[in-house]
Image (cartoon, coloured by chain):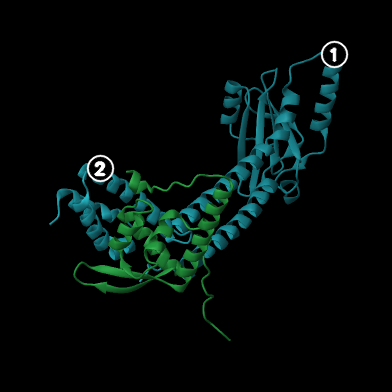
Chain colours: A cyan, B green
Amino acid sequence: MRTPRLRLYALALNLYPTAFHARYADEMLNTARHEYARSPNPRRFTISLAADTLRGALREHLRAASPTRPSYVAAFALFFTCLLLTVSVVHQQFLRRSADGLPGFIAGLVSFPPMDEQSESARQRIVADDLNSPKQEISTPHWLNADNQIFTVLYDPSGRPLTGNATLHGALPQPPHGIFDVIRTRGEDKVTWQPNPGIRVALTGRPLPNGGFVLAGQSLIPSEARTARLDRILRWMWLFAMLACLALVLFTPTRKPTP
Amino acid sequence: MSTSAPAPTAPGPLTPAVFAILLALADGEKHGYAIMLEARQHIAMGPGTLYGSIDRLLAAGLIAETGFTDDERRRYYRLSALGHQALAAEATRLAQSVKRARSKGVRILTRTPEARA
């Protein structure tokens, strides 16, 4: 006959792994029944039986766990996927932000308020050299694929181009007017400008002391090519890892319960 | 060419529970509850510890199952050759420890924990 304590114990035995439960539950219950009948202190017996059950169930679950169990492999696959995605996003963001570096420096140099006479004349000379350098056509593959090739264009307060060292399809580049509103409000704007498919430019704009604007930009194609190269490697790594996980699950023999 | 699996080797030092179970089986086959009653002279263990240890010992080849009774659904277990070897090794190790303890002047208690209780 089973007391409520032993009925509870029979239920608690379900905490053990299924294979272990199937093999030993009857014997364990039988043993507990004999022990209970012999025990002078049922409460103490119950407490020690509960502790033994929790400890034993945890131990058997840990023992049954194997690194090749499908749930572990699935967890690893998920973790690895997230890791590669993180690497890809961080790398892409790093390159994108790096592409803002030189245009930001040039735009800062051109827009800097007048300094002392000597420094100001030096600055104006640099800016003039930059603006008067031969015009580059930014839609050409040569310019688009070049690293660190910066163009600079000055605009009047209404956003109309005045002068610059680059052209887009033969005319000074004219980005959307919204960018000038943002520059006026925030003092700087950094955007990705895509005037045509295949032409992507990291653009930095700043206000000029005379109310106009300066925009400096460089092609994003080289950094995007580097991103694509790394993404291709990451995709292969992911594919290889997923195939390895699948093989691990399919071809690793599972631990059989003791017959 | 032989394709048989390599013979299992005797494990290193045994845990007190495993030693108690192997010792309980040293004089013949027993079922789980009988093992527990005898092992209790060395160490207290509940059904979870007992059957967990039995399962590990079966997997390690130190004990073997000999039969099954229908009356109380009891399985009987006996020591395997490897189990005998492991038990002898552990008993020797313990005897050497006792000898070392004596040589260092450690007083050996004559009363067992049960006698004191």
Q: Which mark is residue A44?
A: 2
A119 on left or right of B47: right
* Quarter of the C terminus of chain B within the rendering: top left
Q: Position of residue A38 (x, y in %)?
A: 21, 52
B84 on left or right of B115: right
Q: Amino acid at mark 2?
A: Arg
In the foreground, A159 or B101: B101
Give the spatial CA distance, label 1 vs label 2: 94 Å
Q: Which mark is residue A211?
A: none
**Callout 1: SS:** helix
How packed mark 2 is, by other alpha carbons closer than 10 Å (few <14, some 14-19, many 20 or more), is few
Position above or below: A194 against A61: above
The answer to whether mark 1 and mark 2 are in CB contact below 8 A is: no
Q: Amino acid at mark 1?
A: Glu
B52 on left or right of B8: left
**Residue ID for mark 1:** A117
In the foreground, A186 or B71: B71
